[in-house]
Amino acid sequence: MESLLSLSFDHLSSFDAGKIRKGLRQLEGLLAQICLPGSSTSSTPDRRRSAVSTPSKERAPKELSQLKDDPAFREFFKLQEGFEWNVAIRLISCLERLLGKGSNDFLDGQNDLLIVSTLDLLQGILLMHPSSRSLFAREIYMNLLLDLLDPTLCPAIHSSAVHTLVAALLCTPRNTRTFETLDGLLTVTSLFKSRSASREVKMKCVEFFYFYLMPETPADSGFAIASIHNGRNGSGSHWGGEEDGTKTAEEKQGLLGRYLGNVADLVEDLRESAVFGGG
């Protein structure tokens, strides 16, 4: 599995669009091997490379209860605990390079597609490996997601960025505090109010507001990745330290109310409809 990750990382570190696309497909194929039934990473190397090149689009994903006992998933999860093989940090670096590319009418379209694909993979990784979410406690990485909500970018990027933002904040209060500190609420509400925002993007923003207003619970202690950089557990870790305190739904309602006028209606709807299973 390390060789497959190394190959995809090499492609993702390129400035060539074709190589980046290939690296994303290789990662998608590896995750398909792990998450989709009827595939096995314990087969021969040739079959493994074939599966990485041609991910399935038809098979239903495995249930989470199946994944946790799957040897391939456990191996992948273990590799994600260290910096060297962590997929999320490679995808973040790839996003930084893609955002830094110059403007070109034809290449812009290609670049937008690569950004969307990278965000979609990042969202999946953050859901598969919760510890990687702690990266977004750092302002530099949270700012990257907020930059992707710039109204001048295309709607597809906005939608994928909002989904990825939800995955980054999920069950991780410290990330939410970083998001608030960086005026993330202002960024999302500004996009929501933008005349150029598509109807779909506005709906994604509303879904985000519902998510944000839900009560918080402290992150599980297992979410903290042991520091590989300095050889200690947690203290001084590249991935972030202890979780900050949570905020109540009422406190967050007050924060969002600074930028949005109908927050009370959203809260009432959240309570009555049990959105996202809340109630």
Image: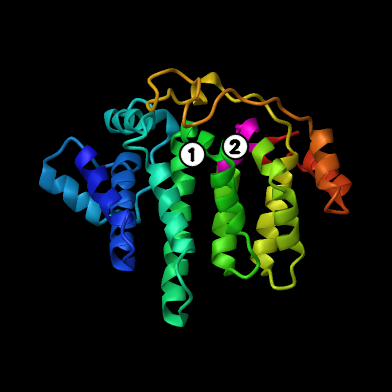
Q: How busy is the neighbourhood of tag 2: few (under 14 within 10 Å), some, or many (20 plus)?
A: many
User: Residue 67: image x %, image y %?
Assistant: 37, 32
Residue drawn at point x = 65 percent, y = 63 percent: 201
The reply to whether residue 185 is visible in this rendering is yes
Q: Is residue 173 rendered magenta in the image?
A: yes
Q: Residue at x 75, y 40 (%)?
A: 213
What secondary structure is the magenta-colored segment mainly? helix
Q: Which residue is mark 1?
A: 127
Residue 95 higher or lower than 152, as above or below: above
In the picture shown, does residue 242 fall above or below 145? above
Seen at 69% across and 68% down, the residue is: 199
Give the magenta-colored segment's residue range: 168-176
Marker disc for residue 221:
none
Q: Are marks 1 and 2 in contact (CB under 8 Å)?
A: yes
Identify the amino acid type marked 2.
Answer: Leu
Residue 157: quarter of image? bottom right
Q: Dividing the picture into quarters, in which one does residue 88 lie?
A: top left
Q: Of 162 and 48, which appears nearest the observer?
A: 162
Rendering coords of residue 184 (x, y %): 69, 49
Closest to the observer: 80 or 226? 226
| Residue 170, disc | 2
State yes or no: residue 127 in magenta: no
Q: CA distance from mark 1 to mark 2?
A: 9 Å
Query: Of the residues shown, which amino acid type is indicated by label 1?
Result: Leu
In the picture, which quadrant includes the C terminus?
A: top right
**In the rendered view, would you say 41 is above or below 158?**
above
Locate residue 40 relative to residue 20 in the image: left or right: left
